[in-house]
Image (tube, helix red, strand yellow):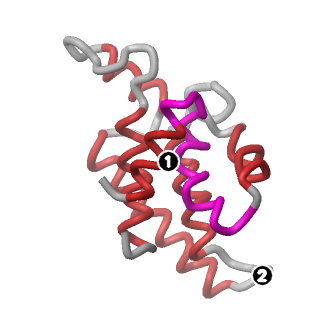
Amino acid sequence: MSEYVQAGHDYFESGHNCAQAVFLPFAKKQMDEKLASKLSSGFGGGIGGMRMTCGALCGAIMAAGLFAGQEGVNKEMQDRERALVVRLNDAFVAEFGTTECKLLLQQDADLPEPADASRPCGKYVRFCAGWIASEFTDD
């Protein structure tokens, strides 16, 4: 397990939401950890607990922005960043079938015995942290 995947797992297990768990391992090397936690906190639970787009995926998109996001207005960088986010989204859908938190949780509930029924999103955190790590780090 990579350093970033392990850190994401540890953040999630310590009670951080899924978006924070993915974003914090990458962000804390570039900004204050408390600020990173605040910035990503609203994306957990499928954006504010509304069970929409997976919070782990949102955290990964934020992390991708740390590495490939545009500064100011730059159309070429914006196009590259958007293509990157599409690849991440497509990889997530290929792995899990959807990006919608509500449907992901429903799929987990349909499993015979989820590993952690109270917080089943660890696998999404690990996938997203791993994808970002493989794309942008040597880890």
Instruction: Specify whether 102 is left or right of 90.
Output: right
Instruction: Characterize the local packing of mark 1: few (<14), some (14-19) or many (20 or more) Cα atoms within 10 angstroms.
Output: many
Q: Is residue 29 magenta?
A: yes
Residue 56, position as x, y percentages in the image? 50, 43
Residue 113, position as x, y percentages in the image? 23, 13
Residue displayed at 80% across by 80% down:
72
* Placement of 63 over or under 107, stated as above or below: below
User: Quick one: SS at disc 2?
Assistant: loop
For the residue pair 98 and 65, the one nearer the viewer reads as 65
Q: Is residue 25 magenta?
A: yes
Range drawn in magenta: 12-31
For the residue pair 98 and 120, the one nearer the viewer reads as 120
Instruction: Specify whether 134 is left or right of 52.
Output: left
Instruction: Specify whether 13 is left or right of 130.
Output: right
Q: Amino acid at mark 2?
A: Val
* Placement of 18 over or under 51, stated as above or below: below
Q: CA distance from mark 1 to mark 2?
A: 24 Å
* Placement of 66 over or under 45, stated as above or below: below
Residue displayed at 71% across by 45% down:
37
Tell me the chief SS of the magenta region: helix
Residue where numbered disc 1 is placed:
57
Instruction: Characterize the local packing of mark 2: few (<14), some (14-19) or many (20 or more) Cα atoms within 10 angstroms.
Output: few
Q: Do the residues under discs 1 and 2 have CB atoms within 8 angstroms?
A: no
Residue displayed at 54% across by 40% down:
11
Residue 91, position as x, y percentages in the image? 33, 56
User: Quick one: SS at disc 1?
Assistant: helix
Residue where numbered disc 2 is placed:
73
Residue displayed at 37% across by 14% down:
117
Q: Amino acid at mark 1?
A: Leu
